[in-house]
Amino acid sequence: MSRSNRERTEQTRQALIDAGRRLFVGKGYAETATPDIAAAAGVTRGALYHHFEDKKALFRAVVEGEARAVAEAIEACPAPDDAPRDALLAGASAYFDALMAEGRTRLLLVEAPAVLGLAATQAIDADNAEMTLRAGLAAMLPGAGAALEPLTLLLSAAFDRAAMAIEAGGERRSYEEAIVVLLDSLADHLRR
């Protein structure tokens, strides 16, 4: 395939992902039809099915892109390398900032588990934001041992619930303070 064909192929794929994201955010997965996605992307339904097996495969590509964007935002946040606790708190703040992108909380935390299933959604998260959380916890809690994996999963779920509450109008500062309490309590417990 020539470079210009590859570029056109990638442009079409990205146009479908962008159109799908807009429609999934605006209407939800169930109410979004493939003809609407194709029309919004300016392509035929045949082009949609050339790039994606079905609507669910397109949705997965949208979710994977959103998860990567969140992980990149966390990785890009300035954090002190010598203070794992401070780095985790900066990462938490970056996570909440990243989830403020229009529709992202709904896509990642509500629609993705319902459409893709919990196992697929957790796998996507494990390759993205959760990986950063695990590394931060390992640095902050070197004595966690076998508890590191369950702690990562539990704290990831806590961050997700906090993000959903913030999006629903909850006071972000209260949730960030609660995260400080959780992290400090974990550290205190493991020091005993």
Image: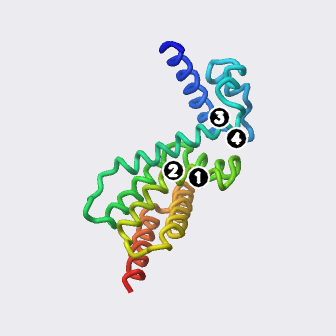
Foreground mark, 3 or 1, reads 1
Label located before the other in sequence (2 or 3): 3
What x and y, as percent, mark residue 95? 44, 54
The quarter of the displayed image where residue 61 is located: top right
How many residues crowd around disc 3 within 10 Å: few (fewer than 14), some, or many (20 or more)? Answer: many
What x and y, as percent, mark residue 1? 54, 15
Label located before the other in sequence (4 or 2): 4
Q: Pointer 1 and pointer 4: residues touching (CB < 8 Å)?
A: no
Amino acid at the residue labelled 1: Ala
User: Please, is residue 175 above or below residue 16 in the view?
Assistant: below
The quarter of the displayed image where residue 192 is located: bottom left
What x and y, as percent, mark residue 141? 38, 72
User: Please, is residue 94 above or below residue 9 in the view?
Assistant: below
How many residues crowd around disc 1 within 10 Å: few (fewer than 14), some, or many (20 or more)? Answer: few
Q: Pointer 2 and pointer 1: residues touching (CB < 8 Å)?
A: yes
User: Please, is residue 107 above or below residue 48 in the view?
Assistant: below
- Residue at the disc numbered 1: 123
- Residue at the disc numbered 4: 29
Q: Secondary structure at mark 1?
A: helix
- Residue at the disc numbered 2: 127
Q: Secondary structure at mark 3?
A: helix
Label located before the other in sequence (4 or 3): 4
- Residue at the disc numbered 3: 58
Amino acid at the residue labelled 2: Asp
